[in-house]
C-alpha cells in the first residue's frame, strides 16, 4: 500500500508494532513507513507531513553522499540515535573528534583527504561503541548466565551482529554507534542467546523475549532511520 504526500510517495508496511517508524532508504531516497495494523491512513499522513523537511534533507544528502557506507560530511551524522551537525575544521594538530552541544567536531590537518576524514570518524565511532559495549556486555552476561569468549567490532553491510557458536566469539557492526543504545542492547542479547540456541527457532526467540520483552520494538527501531 502507498500514499502520496505532496511530491513524496510513501510505501506503508503494517506490522504488529505500537509506534510509527519512518525510513528513507538509499540510494534513491525511497520512503517507507511501518505502522501498527489498525493505524488510520490519516494518522500516517499526518506523521509523514510532520517530517517532510527531514525527508527532503535526507534525500538531498543521499544525492551527494561521497561515502558508500553512510557517513555524512558537512551535514548531519547520527550518534546513539540522535542527529548532530558534523563540523570539519582544519588545525595543525593530531586529528581528533569531539562533541559540543548539537555538533560533532572533526579536527584535521590542512589538506586532509576525504579518506582521512572517513578514517578518523570511523575510528571515533569504533571507540565510543567499544566503550559502551564494554559496559553492557558484563551486565547482560550476568543477567543471562551466558558468556562470550570475546567480542570485536567491524563494519558489516548486511548484519548488525554475528556469533560464532563454535568459538563463542561475537562481532558487532560498527554502525551500531549510530543507533540508540537500546538497539545495541538488543544485538548483544540476540548474539548471546545464540550461545545457548544456535538457530532462530521458537526456543531462541523465547529466550530473547525472556530478557527483552520489547525486542520486536527494538528490532524495528534498529532497522529504521528514525523513530516516531
Image (tube, rainbow, N blue to C red):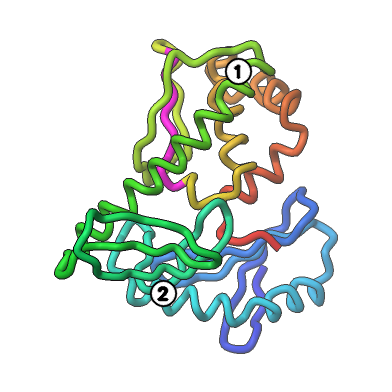
Instruction: Identify the disc placed on residue 170.
Output: none
Looking at the rendered structure, which numbered label has been put on residue 141?
1
Residue at 55 percent across and 19 percent down: it is 194
Left or right: 220 as drawn, with respect to 118: right
Which residue appears at 41% of the width and 11% of the height?
Answer: 166
- Asked whether, in this view, residue 213 is left or right of residue 4, the answer is right
**The N terminus lies in quadrant:** bottom right
Name the residue at 46% across, 76% down: 59
Q: Nearer the viewer, mark 2 or mark 1?
A: 1
Residue stretch rendered in magenta on the structure: 168-175
Q: Residue furthest left?
A: 111
Q: Residue 217: where, in percent of width, then height?
A: 71, 45
Q: Is residue 174 magenta?
A: yes
Disc 2: CA contacts within 10 A as few (<14), some (14-19) or many (>=20): some
Quarter of the image for residue 212 reads: top right
Query: Label 2: which residue?
Result: 61
Classified by dominant secondary structure, the portion drawn in magenta counts as strand
Secondary structure under badge 2?
helix
- Picture layout, residue 132 above or below residue 120: above
Quarter of the figure with residue 168: top left
> Of 25 and 12, which appears nearest the observer?
25
Q: Residues within 10 Å of mark 1 (few under 14, many from 20)?
A: some
Amino acid at each position: 500500500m502507498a500514499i502520496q504526500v505532496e511530491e513524496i510517495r510513501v510505501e506503508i508496511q503494517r506490522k504488529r508494532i505500537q509506534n510509527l517508524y519512518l525510513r528513507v532508504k538509499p540510494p534513491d531516497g525511497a520512503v517507507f513507513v511501518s505502522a501498527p495494523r489498525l493505524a488510520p491512513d490519516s494518522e500516517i499522513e499526518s506523521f509523514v507531513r510532520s517530517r517532510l523537511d527531514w525527508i527532503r534533507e535526507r534525500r538531498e544528502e543521499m544525492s551527494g553522499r561521497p561515502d558508500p557506507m553512510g557517513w555524512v560530511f558537512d551535514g548531519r551524522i547520527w550518534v546513539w540515535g540522535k542527529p548532530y551537525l558534523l563540523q570539519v575544521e582544519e588545525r595543525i594538530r593530531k586529528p581528533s573528534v569531539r562533541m559540543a552541544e548539537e555538533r560533532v567536531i572533526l579536527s584535521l590537518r590542512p589538506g586532509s583527504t576525504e579518506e582521512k576524514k572517513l578514517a578518523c570518524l570511523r575510528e571515533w565511532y569504533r571507540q565510543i561503541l567499544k566503550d559502551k559495549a564494554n559496559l553492557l556486555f558484563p551486565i547482560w552476561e550476568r543477567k543471562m548466565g551466558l558468556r562470550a569468549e570475546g567480542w570485536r567490532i567491524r563494519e558489516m553491510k548486511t548484519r548488525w551482529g554475528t556469533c560464532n557458536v563454535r568459538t563463542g566469539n561475537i562481532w558487532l557492526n560498527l554502525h551500531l554507534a549510530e543507533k540508540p543504545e537500546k538497539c545495541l542492547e538488543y544485538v548483544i542479547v540476540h548474539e548471546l542467546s545464540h550461545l545457548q540456541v544456535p538457530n532462530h527457532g521458537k526456543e531462541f526467540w523465547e529466550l530473547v523475549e525472556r530478557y527483552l520483552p520489547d525486542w520486536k520494538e527494538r528490532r524495528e527501531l534498529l532497522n529504521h532511520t528514525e523513530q516516531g
